[in-house]
Image (tube, rainbow, N blue to C red):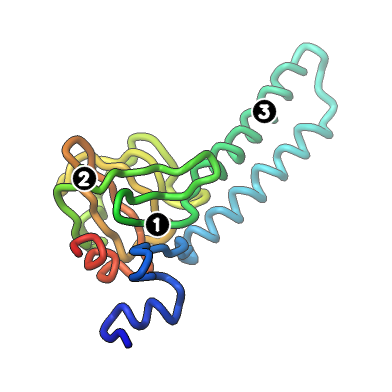
Amino acid sequence: MRSGIFSEFNLRGIMDLESKVFSVPFHWDSAAVAITILVLVFLIGIGFFLYSFKWPTVLLWLKYLLIIVFLATIIIGVGFMPIRLTANEKTISIKRVFGPLEIPRSEIIESRQLMKSDITHSIRTFGSGGLFGYFGQFKSDRIGDYTMYATELTNFVLIRTYNKQYVFSCAHPQEFIVFLQN
């Protein structure tokens, strides 16, 4: 019988020591859910308005351009939205609709838990600030440039490789770090 933190994981199906896999879905905080719902309602509402509005023939191109931009925003957001954090002996993987982001474990030089204060004053240089999660490229005075995939603004893990830094939200950050270090 196993003991310690890993026995809890086996009951929940999050970590399996025999296959050496750690896997947790991304937990959404209420802010990400609210932002996503509000923006979707706004975009869909404006899209229907644009579609039903009687446009002058000269401006029909604008109508269709705006509808395409709104649809592209939704499709791209869903495509890059983080779904599941998985780690095994070889890789750490962020599951997304557009395919996983994979980080070879052999390239990791540091893994540690971050506090929210470490990224509080970060600047988003490209990405989403709440619509379908928080993901993209960010810059912070404390940790520098990093790529973030999160659906909540707590429980952060920093993964530093030879040439990049990644920040993920993780429902069980301490257990994830222990898994990576074993």
> Which residue, given by chain and number where applicable, does mark 3 sit on?
68
Q: CA distance from mark 1 to mark 2?
A: 16 Å
Q: Residues within 10 Å of mark 3 (few under 14, many from 20)?
A: few
> Which quarter of the rendered picture does the C terminus lie within?
bottom left
Which residue is rendered at x = 82% and y = 31% of the image?
53
Question: Reading the chain from its start, which is encountered first: label 3 or label 1?
Answer: 3
The vertical placement of 33 against 73, above or below, is below
User: Dots 3 and 1: beta carbons under 8 Å?
Assistant: no
SS at badge 1: strand
**Residue 155 occupies which quadrant of the picture?**
bottom left
Question: Reading the chain from its start, which is encountered first: label 2 or label 3?
Answer: 3
Which is closer to the viewer, label 1 or label 2? 2
Q: Is residue 37 left or right of residue 124?
A: right
> Which residue, given by chain and number where applicable, does mark 2 sit on?
106
> Which quarter of the rendered picture does the N terminus lie within?
bottom left
Q: Nearer the viewer, residue 30 or 8?
A: 8
- Residue 21 locus on image (x, y percent): 37, 62
Q: Amino acid at mark 1?
A: Thr
> Which residue, given by chain and number where applicable, does mark 1 sit on?
86
SS at badge 3: helix
Question: Reading the chain from its start, which is encountered first: label 1 or label 2?
Answer: 1
User: Dots 1 and 2: beta carbons under 8 Å?
Assistant: no
The vertical placement of 150 against 24, above or below, is above
Q: Nearer the viewer, residue 138 or 82?
A: 82
